[in-house]
Amino acid sequence: MRVIAGEARGRRLRSVPGDVTRPITDRVKEALFNILGERVIGVCVLDLFAGTGSVGIEALSRGARRAVFVEQDGRALRTIRENLLATNLRERAEIIASDVFDYLAHLGPEEQFGFVYVAPPQYKGLWARTLRVLDQKPPLTPQGVVVVQIFPKEYEPLALSHLTLTDRRRYGSTLLCFYEPTSEE
C-alpha cells in the first residue's frame, strides 16, 4: 500500500495489525482518484471508518486542504498517526478517536466537506446506516460527493431525500458508490 500521486507520491503506508480493517487496494484507490480528478483540490475531506487513513492521505497528497479521520480502533488510530508522519501530512490532518455515529451526531452545520469517504466493516449494514445519517443533513459542499466502499453483494438501493446515487463502479470484490446532493438542494 502506497501513496499513488501528489506531494507524498511513492511513500509506503503501514497496514493496521490484525484483520480489523480491509484497506482499499492501490488499484481501486487509483481508479477512485482518477474519477474524482481535481474535485479534491482545496477541499476538506472526511474519512469515516478511516482504517489506515489511506484514502484521506491520498486526498491530502493530491491537494486537499484538510482531512478529518474518524476511527475508534486503537491499532488503526496508531497506524493513521504513523502514516501521516511518514508522509509529512500531519499538519493538515485531524484524527478523531470516536464512533462514526457519535461523531456525525455532534457534527455542526458549519462543517462542510467536498469529499466524504465511507468504508465500514463488511456485512454489518453500517454503510447503509451511515448513508442514512449523512442524508439527514449532508455535511457536503454544493459540489461535494460521498463515496461508499462496500462488497458488491452488500449493495441495495436506498430511499434517500438529500443524496442521489450518481455512479457505481465495481473493481473485483470492491464496489464504489458515488452519492451527490440532490439537484434541488
Image (cartoon, rainbow, N blue to C red):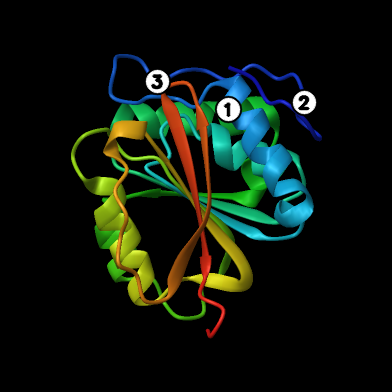
Residue under pointer 3: 16
Residue under pointer 1: 28
Tell which of 55 and 76 is nearer to you.
Answer: 55
Task: Nearest to the eye among marks 2 and 1: give it.
Answer: 1
Placement of the N terminus among the 4 image quadrants: top right
Q: Is residue 83 left or right of residue 158?
A: right
- Give the mark, 2 or 1, whose residue is nearer the N terminus: 2
- Disc 3 on helix, strand or loop? loop
Residue under pointer 2: 9
Please state the horizontal and vertical placement of residue 12, each as a whole percent of the image.
64, 16
Q: Are marks 2 and 3 in contact (CB under 8 Å)?
A: no
The vertical placement of 112 against 121, above or below, is: below
- Disc 1 on helix, strand or loop? helix
C-alpha gap between disc 3 and disc 1? 18 Å
Type of amino acid under label 3: Val
Tell which of 24 and 65 is nearer to you.
Answer: 24
Type of amino acid under label 1: Val
Q: Residue furthest front?
A: 157
Quarter of the image holding residue 103?
A: bottom left
Binning the other alpha carbons within 10 Å of mark 2 as few (below 14), some (14 to 19) or many (20 upward) gives: some
Q: Residue drawn 30% across and 60% down?
A: 158
- Disc 2 on helix, strand or loop? loop
